[in-house]
């Protein structure tokens, strides 16, 4: 479906413009960003498109290829609390933009996405693309950091998912054929070129057939368990700990944690061990990427996936099985589930020359285990972040 053509069909006029925001994967650095950790990421060459036109008044009117009906709200009277539907991300980011820029004119918009089995941060992509359209319609030119901050705040404070900045950062900062390395403590980042001799790769996206939703899942609980580990270790060690929401695992040195970890509840200890090990894997992964060693990088991805299952304790039976099938498939350098493990998909770095064999083997083994679920496999390239 062409987004501009569908806009014209639905609203009987041509759009003023179309913006695009990519999906993302996080090969290393899972579950670290909400506690100021280290992450890596790729943007994909697939994502969300928003066709839009400027309205004369202050009404926002949005349709979607994925949902029935049109959502409407007035910029001057956006509901202060979420309504419980797919447009909450858009209402939330409207409020964020309105804090710094008023008055705002409304827009008519139509949203369409490439495939999205869940777990590729389509929610952040929708939020950013809509925000970009609203900014363009109003002649507002935020910087990359402002886009990331507004989209993250909308998701955290309006929708209620206590995410870090991984998703939004990948979808804005990434560049094709570069590995994003981001320190979420201070927002510093670099784009790492693959070392000489790196074997060719694709990004495989393998859908489990399970729906994906973070709001209402145990995503927030896991983040709180990690914060609780940091808060408790600080108390044991006599470190000033302040408010709970201002405490992060990054505040606690590894040797301090090791000293007190046996006094923690199992769940707190496991979350912290995953966090420290994952940050270490990011450092090793960046070095492997710089050296052109995709096998070592993929091996770290496999470790990350198993740690998310064993220590972070996410991943349904279906996603766990899919992860292990992929990790034991010839031509897959490394694999892990994507999007926190609450439904959705697995992401893998794969050998393009073995695409058909990979798809056939993984589908056969997964469908034998879960015949009622609709499995799919897509192979993508890395892509650029959103144009702002």
Image (tube, helix red, strand yellow):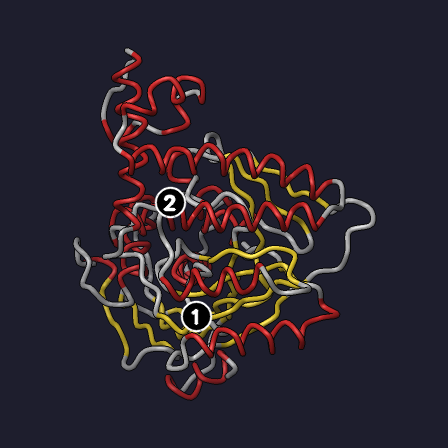
Quadrant in which residue 223 is drawn: top left
Spot occupied by residue 61 in the image (x, y as percentages of width and height): 30, 72
Q: Earlier in the sequence, mark 1 or mark 2?
A: 1
- Give 127 or 104, whichever is nearer the viewer: 127
| Neighbour tally class for label 2: few under 14, some 14-19, many 20 plus, Cα within 10 Å | many
Q: Is residue 137 above or below residue 362?
A: above
The structure residue drawn at horizontal position 46% and vertical position 78%, both measured from the top left corner, is 368
User: Mark 1 falls on what kind of element?
Assistant: strand
- Give 58 or 187, whichever is nearer the viewer: 187
Spot occupied by residue 201 in the image (x, y as percentages of width and height): 70, 60
Q: Is residue 231 above or below residue 297?
A: above
- Give 192 or 80, whichever is nearer the viewer: 192
Q: Quadrant of the C terminus?
A: bottom right
Q: Check residue 228 in the rendering and tell me which mark sits there, or answer none.
A: none
Q: From this viewpoint, which residue is outermost toward the top? A: 238
Spot occupied by residue 91 in the image (x, y as percentages of width and height): 27, 59
Structural distance between the alpha carbons of marks 1 and 2: 20 Å
| Neighbour tally class for label 1: few under 14, some 14-19, many 20 plus, Cα within 10 Å | many
Identify the residue position indicated by label 1 in the image. 208
Q: Is residue 50 above or below residue 332?
A: below
Identify the residue position indicated by label 2 in the image. 312
User: Mark 2 falls on what kind of element?
Assistant: loop
Spot occupied by residue 162 in the image (x, y as percentages of width and height): 30, 45
Q: Is residue 300 left or right of residue 337?
A: right
């Amino acid at each position: 479906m062409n987004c501009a053509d569908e806009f014209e069909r639905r609203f009987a006029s041509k759009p003023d413009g179309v913006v695009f925001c990519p999906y993302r994967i996080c090969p290393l650095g899972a579950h670290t960003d909400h506690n100021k950790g280290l992450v890596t990421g790729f943007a994909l060459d697939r994502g969300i498109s928003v066709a839009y036109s400027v309205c004369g008044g202050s009404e926002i009117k949005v349709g979607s290829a994925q949902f029935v009906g049109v959502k409407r709200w007035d910029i001057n009277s956006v509901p202060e609390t979420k309504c419980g539907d797919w447009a909450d991300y858009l209402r939330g980011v409207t409020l964020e933009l309105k804090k710094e820029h008023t008055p705002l004119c409304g827009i008519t918009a139509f949203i369409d996405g490439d495939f999205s089995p869940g777990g590729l941060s389509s929610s952040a992509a929708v939020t950013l693309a809509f925000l970009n359209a609203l900014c363009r319609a109003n002649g507002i030119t935020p910087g990359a950091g402002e886009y990331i901050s507004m989209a993250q705040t909308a998701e955290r404070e309006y929708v209620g998912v206590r995410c870090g900045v991984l998703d939004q950062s990948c979808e804005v900062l990434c560049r094709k054929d570069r590995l994003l390395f981001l320190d979420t403590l201070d927002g510093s980042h670099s784009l790492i070129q693959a070392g000489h001799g790196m074997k060719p790769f694709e990004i495989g996206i393998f859908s489990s057939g399970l729906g994906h939703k973070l709001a209402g899942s145990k995503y927030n609980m896991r983040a709180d368990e990690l914060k609780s580990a940091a808060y408790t270790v600080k108390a044991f060690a006599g470190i000033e700990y302040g408010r709970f929401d201002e405490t992060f695992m990054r505040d606690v040195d590894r040797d301090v944690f090791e000293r007190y970890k046996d006094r923690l509840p199992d769940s707190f200890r496991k979350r912290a061990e995953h966090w420290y090990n994952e940050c270490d894997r990011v450092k090793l992964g960046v070095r492997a990427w710089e050296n052109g060693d995709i096998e070592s990088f993929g091996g770290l991805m496999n470790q990350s996936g198993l740690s998310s299952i064993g220590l972070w304790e996410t991943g349904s039976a279906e996603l766990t099985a899919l992860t292990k099938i992929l990790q034991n498939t010839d031509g897959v350098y490394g694999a892990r589930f994507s999007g926190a493990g609450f439904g959705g998909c697995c992401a893998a770095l794969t050998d393009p020359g073995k695409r058909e064999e990979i798809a056939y083997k993984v589908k056969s083994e997964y469908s034998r285990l879960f015949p009622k679920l609709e499995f799919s496999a897509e192979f993508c390239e890395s892509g650029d972040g959103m144009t702002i």
